[in-house]
Amino acid sequence: GAGVSQSPSNKVTEKGKDVELRCDPISGHTALYWYRQSLGQGLEFLIYFQGNSAPDKSGLPSDRFSAERTGGSVSTLTIQRTQQEDSAVYLCASSLVRAGELFFGEGSRLTVL
Amino acid sequence: QQQVKQSPQSLIVQKGGISIINCAYENTAFDYFPWYQQFPGKGPALLIAIRPDVSEKKEGRFTISFNKSAKQFSLHIMDSQPGDSATYFCAARGGADGLTFGKGTHLIIQP
């Protein structure tokens, strides 16, 4: 596809369950970002991947959050033992170079009951 | 900590009016200042951007004004239209953090 693809678009889960959110960036983009956006709020940086370098995990809010990027392409954000405060839209973005123009996906809306 | 402070948090403008959103930064190492536009249910998308060696950039009805000495930049939307209703994020690039976003402005254009 031409843009950043995220799945699922919506996920409802029960407190304590684990969830996986997937991001398929634009082909050839070396940089990949995950952001969290709570209702009506700004963009909270979570994690950044650049090529084969070690990711910048400085924005992950707790050790329940982890992410990986396989083969320099698809990324998965995993939230373990979900809590109600994890409810938000999780946005993925990719860019051709570090901090260049970011292309965002439409997000995965997570609701933790 | 690197920050970009954005104001106002929300803004209501009459159709045909001028919408103005302001941002301020501290880090003089920032070298690129984009604005992103986000419609409900969509991801943000790049609207317009400026580099610090330019004081103004205009694309259609959208203009960025940049004041390097004051470390401030602003987005002006001329002849605002209901279709401009969205959330706008300023951002700044530089340093170890890459791209730093403001907290966003929710803009409503009333017909």
Image (tube, coloured by chain):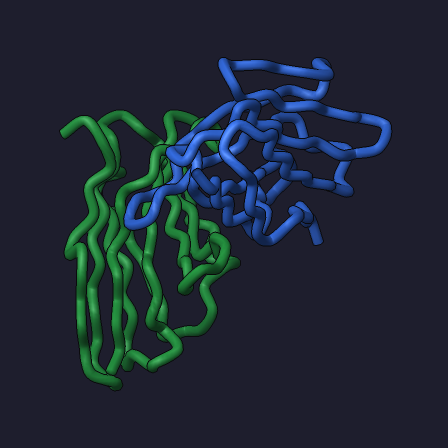
Chain colours: A green, B blue
Q: Is residue A29 left or right of residue A100?
A: left
- Image height of B64 relative to A39, above or below: above
Q: Among all residues in the image, which is located at the extreme front? A: B111
- Image height of B36 relative to A21, above or below: above
Q: Residue drawn at (24%, 83%), measured in percent from left and top?
A: A113
Q: Residue drawn at (28%, 42%), measured in percent from left and top?
A: A105
**Residue A23: x %, y % from top left:** 23, 47
Q: Nearer the viewer, residue B84 or A54?
A: B84
Q: Residue drawn at (68%, 40%), measured in percent from left and top?
A: B23
Residue B42 visible in the displayed image: yes
**Residue A27: x %, y % from top left:** 22, 28
Q: Residue drawn at (59%, 47%), measured in percent from left and top?
A: B102
**Residue B30: x %, y % from top left:** 68, 32
Quadrant (top left/top right/bottom left/bottom right) for the N terminus of chain A: top left
Q: Nearer the viewer, residue A29 or A86?
A: A86
Q: Nearer the viewer, residue A67 or A87?
A: A87
- Image height of B77 relative to A56, above or below: above
Residue B33 visible in the displayed image: no
Q: Is residue A5 left or right of residue A56?
A: left
- Image height of A81 relative to A69, above or below: below
Could you tell me how many numbered marks the image carries? 0
Q: Is residue B80 left or right of residue A5?
A: right
Based on the displayed image, in which of its 4 quarters is residue A71 positioned?
Answer: top left
